[in-house]
């Protein structure tokens, strides 16, 4: 029922969630060798869910495959490296203080405090396989959000895309059905999800310095 509902709400979100969920499942399969039997069962259950959803959604899928389409025009909007660290105009506090970067995107903005928090977590939990999994998922989503070509600086609404000519892994997926209409910048939601899990685990050990850094992330 969840798969059917998500398709009816947004087939783009269903496709991208399936892709990044698959990446997480493959990463877990590689990292947790002793859990591979359980992970195979999970994969089979997911396949069964999608097959059942496909039967229910058969009329919609038929129209999707054979009907007319109006491709969205925002698929070219991808993140740039500065988007990750520099605050955009839409970030209220930094805008008031004059610290915003007008060529940065609000969707893909992570912020320096959260980057520092993730780096600290990666170092302190460097021997934890759970940390490896979360960091792998975060890295996969972040790289995908950069689109099929690396751009160093952000872009304004009227600015041309300033690519470097360096191809990125998303180029392998951008030509696939459904995913070809996905907006890479929106993959930042999966970056945020992984980062939120990392922050929650990092804060479990307490300490005022940790909470102070977490407060900066919120600001």
Image: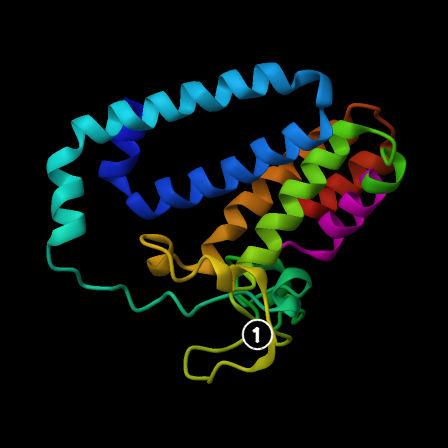
Q: Is residue 118 left or right of residue 58?
A: right
Q: Is residue 53 visible?
A: yes
Q: Is residue 60 left or right of residue 127?
A: left
Q: Is residue 135 left or right of residue 64?
A: right
Residue 181 appears in which quarter of the rendering? bottom left
Residue 42 x/y as whole percent: 50, 19
Which element type, helix, strand or loop, lies under badge 1? loop
Q: Is residue 179 left or right of residue 79?
A: left
Picture quarter with the N terminus: top left
Residue 10 x/y as whole percent: 29, 43
Residue drawn 66% across the image and 49% down it: 139
Residue drawn 42% across the image and 18% down it: 45
Q: Is residue 219 visible?
A: no
**168 vs 121, nearest the viewer:** 168
Residue drawn 59% across the image and 80% down it: 165
Q: Specify the color scheme.
A: rainbow
Give the residue at mark 1.
154
Up-down relation of residue 97 to residue 201 (above or below): below
Q: Report if residue 146 lies within the magenta region.
A: no
Up-down relation of residue 156 to residue 48 (above or below): below
**39 vs 122, nearest the viewer:** 39
Q: Report if residue 116 lies within the magenta region.
A: yes
Residue 144 appears in which quarter of the rendering? bottom right
Residue 53 x/y as whole percent: 25, 27
Which residue range is magenta in the image? 109-121
Could you classify mark 1 by the number of other residues whose Cα lies within 10 Å: few (under 14), some (14-19), or many (20 or more)? many
Residue drawn 29% across the image and 26% down it: 51
Task: Please give the count of numbered marks on the rendered protein.
Answer: 1
Dominant secondary structure, magenta: helix
**103 vs 5, nearest the viewer:** 5
**149 vs 85, nearest the viewer:** 149
């Amino acid at each position: 029922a969840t798969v059917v509902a998500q398709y009816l709400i947004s087939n783009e979100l269903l496709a991208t969630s399936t892709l990044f969920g698959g990446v997480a499942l493959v990463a877990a399969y590689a990292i947790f060798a002793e859990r591979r039997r359980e992970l195979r069962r999970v994969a089979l259950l997911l396949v069964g869910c999608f097959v059942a959803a496909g039967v229910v959604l058969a009329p919609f899928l038929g129209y999707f495959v054979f009907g007319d389409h109006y491709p969205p025009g925002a698929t070219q909007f991808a993140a740039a490296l500065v988007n990750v660290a520099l605050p955009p105009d839409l970030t209220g506090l930094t805008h008031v203080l004059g610290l915003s970067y007008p060529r940065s995107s609000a969707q893909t903005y992570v912020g320096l405090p959260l980057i520092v928090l993730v780096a600290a977590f990666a170092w302190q939990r460097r021997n934890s396989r759970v940390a490896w999994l979360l960091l792998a998922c975060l890295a996969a989503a972040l790289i995908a959000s950069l689109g099929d070509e690396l751009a160093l600086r952000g872009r304004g609404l009227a600015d041309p895309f300033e690519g470097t000519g360096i191809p990125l892994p998303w180029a392998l997926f951008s030509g696939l059905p459904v995913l070809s209409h996905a907006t890479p910048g929106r993959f930042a939601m999966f970056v945020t999800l992984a980062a939120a899990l990392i922050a929650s685990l990092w804060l479990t050990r307490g300490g005022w310095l940790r909470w102070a850094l977490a407060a900066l992330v919120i600001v």
